[in-house]
């Protein structure tokens, strides 16, 4: 096995792993855990090697099946794509430990089916980070979406209904994207991203081009749950099995934000997207500010921890979209850093939620009483994640928010700056309310055996270890923000900026 | 007025797709029955598939299967064959559409088992209780 094709193995490993998990998992459930972990562990190490190689040698272009780029499908691994590869595989690997444990309880006897879809979803996400072909991107987008529909529908109660609403909304988004690509194909006669960009340079700006851009953008916004188009997300992510939401919640929206950056820079040019229509650019930043404020306000109204977290995800999508559309280096740096940080924060908080639900069976605010005594390590990690969400240094969340604020001030987008500050305050209220309930209120009614005895009932090690790891990663990324920004993200910001 | 009619007649196929797409969109947003929503989604997808396919068509163009030797010695006159690429792309899109429909039907089955109905109003009523 030569190492020059390492990047294609990152994509192939979860894909083949999915088949292996399905077939061998039928024989014996014992195969599921080692196969899934092995495949994802391999992908993580390979992604690390590929990132190092891309940083050293520059962008890698790979032609699948030796069909030359404008005709065949090209995989392009630029620094940003390599960073996303590492993020996807590392987050997925960490989440898997927890979901193996919780799925064993939530879906007994169906682990192999669950992890088949789980691995296919990761293969799709990996492909999204790699592909350099506009139509291929549509197919991979649908692979990730269809597997997500299935994973969400495996939950209990309202999960199938939430999944169906997601199917309708998600398919509209994908169709819009497909339609936009169709317009681009009519204009240029090619589907390769680099080739489209090359031909578009020589074309006059037409209404068709603007239509293509608008359709692609709105399609991706639906997929990433940008505020007015977010209605499918909270219920779907709340009702999903906790083993699925620990992986879907950190990755899906963040990868779609990455796709938006990819479309703006690899197909269109930043000049076209940001500067030809300043009104549109400013309008989108205002929409992002509105998204942040409204989603934060909606989060305040929730009485269930997981549901509250999903509204925070919607607000965070507003952060990133706004950061990208600020159209300056600070904002873009902040947006990309926030993709990394938000994936880790969401991972940390959802892992904590999964651990709590494993022990207490409920995430209503009332059932959180006295949790700091019962699950001290879980709640300590939860607190780190919460601090990062609020943006308290030295956790990672502070630094990306700082860049976003600087970008907003540089672009004089005061509405966006105000929305960021408002959202931080709301997050502080949200999380300190939970900390107050879990720390100061002791649920005497919850225990049957006397008020003095508080038993420590930590989550199993398989759930606790990834949670602690995610919390430590938040602090490590916080301290390492400087090198991360200078060494990776500055390179990852595409040219022309 | 004359100009608008001429425009519509000249590009009638695209207008039909717009109409089809809006029918699908209406069904997805306006209908209260979940299966009707799914059918709306299918109409929506079909409109896009037809849009793609018709972009490859040329008046008087034949099927894009050509004799290898003739093509290599004389080249191909692009006006005599339709563009096959949009058709090939739509084969993939049809597969995607079928998969989405399959997953959606399976999900609807679970919804029906859970609530005993596929009318959205009745389901929301049952959830509200």
Image (cartoon, grey):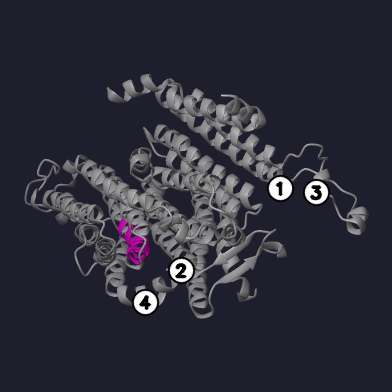
Q: Of label 3 and label 1, which has the lower sequence position?
A: 3
Name the residue beneath numbered marker 3: B78
Secondary structure type for disc 3: helix
Q: Position of residue A346 (x, y in %)?
A: 32, 55
| Residue B68 magenta | no
Q: Residue at x 65, y 32 (%)?
A: B11
Frontmost residue, A248 versus A486: A486
**Residue neighbourhood size for the residue with mark 3, other residues' Cα within 10 Å, grouped as few (<14), some (14–19), many (≥20):** few
Discs 3 and 4 carry the same chain letter: no
Q: Position of residue A266 (x, y in %)?
A: 52, 61
Comparing marks 2 and 4, which lies closer to the viewer?
2
- Residue B85 is marked as 1
- Residue that extends furthest to the front in the rendered view of this protein: B2
Name the residue beneath numbered marker 2: A496
**Residue neighbourhood size for the residue with mark 2, other residues' Cα within 10 Å, grouped as few (<14), some (14–19), many (≥20):** few
Discs 2 and 3 carry the same chain letter: no
Discs 1 and 4 carry the same chain letter: no
Classify the position of the C terminus of chain A by image quarter.
Answer: bottom left
Discs 2 and 4 carry the same chain letter: yes
Q: Magenta span covers which residues?
A: A331-347
Q: Residue at x 24, y 58 (%)?
A: A389
Frontmost residue, A233 versus A37: A233
Magenta part, dominant SS: helix
Name the residue beneath numbered marker 4: A486
Q: Quadrant of residue B56?
A: top right
Tell me the distance, in whole angstroms, between the alpha carbons under discs 3 and 4: 51 Å
Tell me the distance, in whole angstroms, between the alpha carbons under discs 2 and 1: 32 Å
């Amino acid at each position: 096995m030569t190492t020059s094709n390492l990047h294609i193995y990152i994509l192939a490993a979860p894909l083949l792993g999915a088949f292996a998990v399905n077939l061998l998992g039928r024989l014996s459930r014992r195969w599921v855990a080692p196969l899934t972990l092995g495949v994802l562990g391999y992908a993580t190490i390979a992604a690390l090697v590929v990132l190092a190689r891309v940083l050293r040698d520059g962008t890698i272009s790979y032609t699948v099946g030796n069909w030359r780029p404008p005709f065949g499908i090209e995989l392009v691994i630029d620094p940003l794509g390599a960073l996303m590869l590492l993020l996807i595989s590392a987050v997925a690997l960490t989440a898997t430990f927890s979901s193996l444990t919780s799925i064993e309880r939530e879906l007994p006897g169906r682990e192999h089916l669950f992890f088949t879809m789980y691995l296919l979803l990761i293969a799709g996400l990996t492909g999204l980070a790699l592909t350099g072909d506009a139509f291929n991107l549509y197919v991979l987008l649908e692979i990730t979406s269809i597997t997500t529909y299935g994973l969400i529908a495996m939950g209990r109660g309202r999960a199938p209904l939430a999944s169906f609403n997601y199917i309708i909304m998600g398919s509209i988004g994908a169709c819009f994207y497909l339609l936009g690509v169709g317009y681009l194909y009519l204009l240029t006669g090619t589907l390769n991203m680099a080739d489209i960009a090359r031909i578009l340079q020589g074309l006059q700006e037409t209404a068709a081009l603007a239509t293509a851009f608008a359709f692609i953008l709105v399609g991706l916004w639906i997929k990433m749950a940008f505020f007015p188009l977010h209605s499918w997300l909270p219920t779907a992510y709340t009702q999903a099995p906790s083993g699925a939401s620990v992986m879907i919640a950190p990755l899906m929206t963040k990868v779609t934000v990455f796709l938006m950056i990819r479309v703006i820079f690899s197909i269109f040019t930043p000049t076209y997207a940001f500067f030809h229509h300043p009104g549109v650019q400013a309008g989108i930043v205002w929409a992002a500010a509105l998204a942040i404020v409204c989603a934060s306000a909606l989060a305040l109204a929730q009485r269930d921890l997981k549901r509250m977290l999903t509204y925070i995800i919607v607000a965070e999508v507003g952060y990133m979209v706004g950061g990208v559309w600020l159209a300056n280096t600070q904002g873009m740096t902040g947006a990309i850093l926030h993709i990394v940080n938000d994936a880790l924060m969401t991972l940390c908080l959802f892992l904590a939620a999964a651990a709590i639900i494993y022990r207490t069976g409920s995430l209503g605010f009332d059932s959180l009483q006295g949790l700091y005594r019962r699950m001290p390590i879980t709640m300590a990690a939860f607190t780190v994640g919460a601090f990062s969400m609020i943006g308290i240094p030295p956790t990672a969340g502070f630094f990306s928010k700082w860049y976003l604020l600087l970008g907003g001030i540089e672009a004089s987008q005061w509405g966006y700056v105000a929305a960021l500050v408002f959202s931080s305050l709301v997050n502080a209220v949200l999380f300190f309310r939970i900390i107050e309930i879990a720390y100061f209120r002791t649920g005497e009614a919850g225990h049957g055996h006397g008020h003095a005895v508080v038993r420590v009932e930590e989550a199993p090690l398989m759930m606790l270890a990834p949670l602690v790891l995610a919390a430590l990663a938040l602090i490590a990324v916080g301290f390492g923000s400087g090198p991360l920004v200078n060494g990776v993200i500055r390179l990852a910001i595409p040219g022309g900026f | 007025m004359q100009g608008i009619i001429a425009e519509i007649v000249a590009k009638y196929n695209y207008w039909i797709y717009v109409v089809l797409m809006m029918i699908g969109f209406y069904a997805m947003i306006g209908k209260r029955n979940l299966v009707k929503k799914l059918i709306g989604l299918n109409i929506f997808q079909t409109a896009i598939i037809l849009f793609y396919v018709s972009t490859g068509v040329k008046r008087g163009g034949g099927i894009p299967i050509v004799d290898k030797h003739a093509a290599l010695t004389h080249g191909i006159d692009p006006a005599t064959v339709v563009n096959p690429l949009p058709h090939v792309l739509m084969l993939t899109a049809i597969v995607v559409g079928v998969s989405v429909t399959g997953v959606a039907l399976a999900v609807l089955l679970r919804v029906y088992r859970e609530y005993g109905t596929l009318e959205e109003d009745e389901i929301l009523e049952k959830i509200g209780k």
